[in-house]
Image (tube, grey):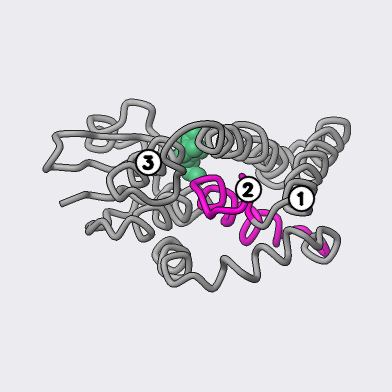
Amino acid sequence: MITFYSVNTANGQKAAIALEEAELAYEMKPIDLKKGEHLSAEFLAVNPVGRAPVIADDSEDLVLYGTFPIAIYAAERSNTMLPPSGNARARAFERAAFVASDVGPAFTGQFVFGTIFKERLPSVIEHYDQLVHRMVGVMDQYLGETEYLAGDEYTIADVLGYPVAATSLARLPGALERYGNIRRWCDTIGQRPAVVRGMAACS
Ligand SMILES: N[C@@H](CCC(=O)N[C@@H](CS)C(=O)NCC(=O)O)C(=O)O
């Protein structure tokens, strides 16, 4: 059985969708960031980084932190969400990494400096606003070229990308209207039963 240390954020949703797509049974242990549970001794013993999502798979004696590794693990356990080999597999990793390390952190910076920090730093806020739109613009461009983020097949890149669009991007007024290809893609994959379940699990 997998224990899923979840968070009610886009990152939690990404991991939940991956587990749902793979049809892996899991038990949720929600981590409440507002109560500081991610920094408790109990959770730090599981993940010294003090961040979620994390999965602990008893049957494999394995603990994994982070959306990207969890998505790969779920894909490989289920033979879904990843092309078996070659350039298509490399492309899926490239696009998943783009979402995980370029698009996601741009939104994190925008949220931290635009919403969480009490100090207003206009040049930093502007930097992150521009970065978000630059990164999202590339996502939109990719989705104008192919049906899914990494080509013609649904992959872990879509699993990681969907909550970014449906949760983080949707917070920005008018954004989904501005990026028509992302909207088309959201409308399609947002109806997948595993996506619906994964989003609901971490909302
Ligand atoms: N690289 C990680 C980032 C995970 C992350 O930022 N988790 C946030 C919640 S969405 C967290 O636990 N934040 C607590 C903190 O930074 O103290 C991933 O892709 O999963």
Asked which secondary structure carries label 2, the reply is loop
Name the residue rendered at 81%, 58% in the picture: 179
Check disc 2 and report the residue beneath it: 151
Q: Position of residue 105 (x, y in %)?
A: 63, 35
Asked which secondary structure carries label 1, the reply is helix
Name the residue rendered at 33%, 42% in the picture: 76
Q: Which residues are magenta?
A: 148-174
Check disc 1 and report the residue beneath it: 145
The residue carrying mark 1 has its beta carbon less than 8 Å from ligand 1: no
Q: Magenta includes 157?
A: yes
Q: Is residue 163 left or right of 119 when viewed as pictured?
A: left
What amino acid is found at the position of numbered circle 2 in the picture? Gly
- Cα gap from disc 3 to disc 2, whole angstroms: 21 Å
- Cα gap from disc 1 to disc 2, whole angstroms: 8 Å
What amino acid is found at the position of numbered circle 3 in the picture? Ile
Q: Nearer the viewer, residue 50 or 75?
A: 75
Task: Please report contact status of discs 3 and 2: CB closer than 8 Å, yes or no.
Answer: no
Q: Is residue 21 left or right of 149 when viewed as pictured?
A: left
Asked which secondary structure carries label 3, the reply is helix
Check disc 3 and report the residue beneath it: 70
